[in-house]
Amino acid sequence: MQEASLSEVLRVLLIVLLIYFGFKLIIRWFGPIILRYFLKKVGKKFEQKFSQFDPTAGQQQKQGEVTIDKKPNNKRKSKNDVGEYIDYEEID
């Protein structure tokens, strides 16, 4: 059975700490760049998905041109007759 000397333990500990702090430093420098890249990628996918449902998404109007889109009148009138009101008296 081999025994680890103090210098070998310190050497391994130093290597682990250097890797940890090096990784932390790299993430601090390149993290925002990587995050920005993924956010742009997700934003483009979202725009593509949204433009499939909006037919006017790709159309651009000339400056000063006005377009009015009328929404259909879908107001539903309730024909539910709830009956007449009955006033109840409390009995002791």
Image (cartoon, rainbow, N blue to C red):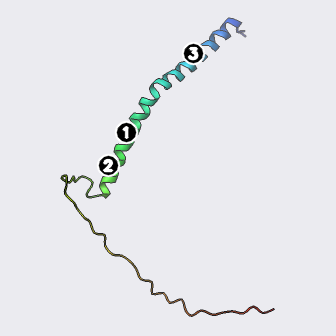
Q: CA distance from mark 1 to mark 3?
A: 32 Å
Give the side of residue 32 with respect to residue 14, left or right: left
Measuring from the top left, give residue 14's x and y in whole percent. 62, 12
Tell me the residue at 25%/64% (across/down): 68
Circle 1 residue? 40
Label annotation for residue 18: 3
Q: Quadrant of residue 57?
A: bottom left
Percent position of residue 34, x then y = 42, 31
Mark in the foreground, 1 or 3 = 1
The answer to whether mark 1 and mark 2 are in CB contact below 8 A is no
Residue occupying image coordinates x 37% and y 48%: 46
Q: Which mark is first along the chain, 3 or 1?
A: 3
Work out whether mark 1 precedes mark 2 in sequence or the reverse, and give the earlier one. 1
Circle 3 — which element? helix
Indicate the amino acid at tag 3: Leu
Is disc 2 placed on a helix, strand or loop?
helix
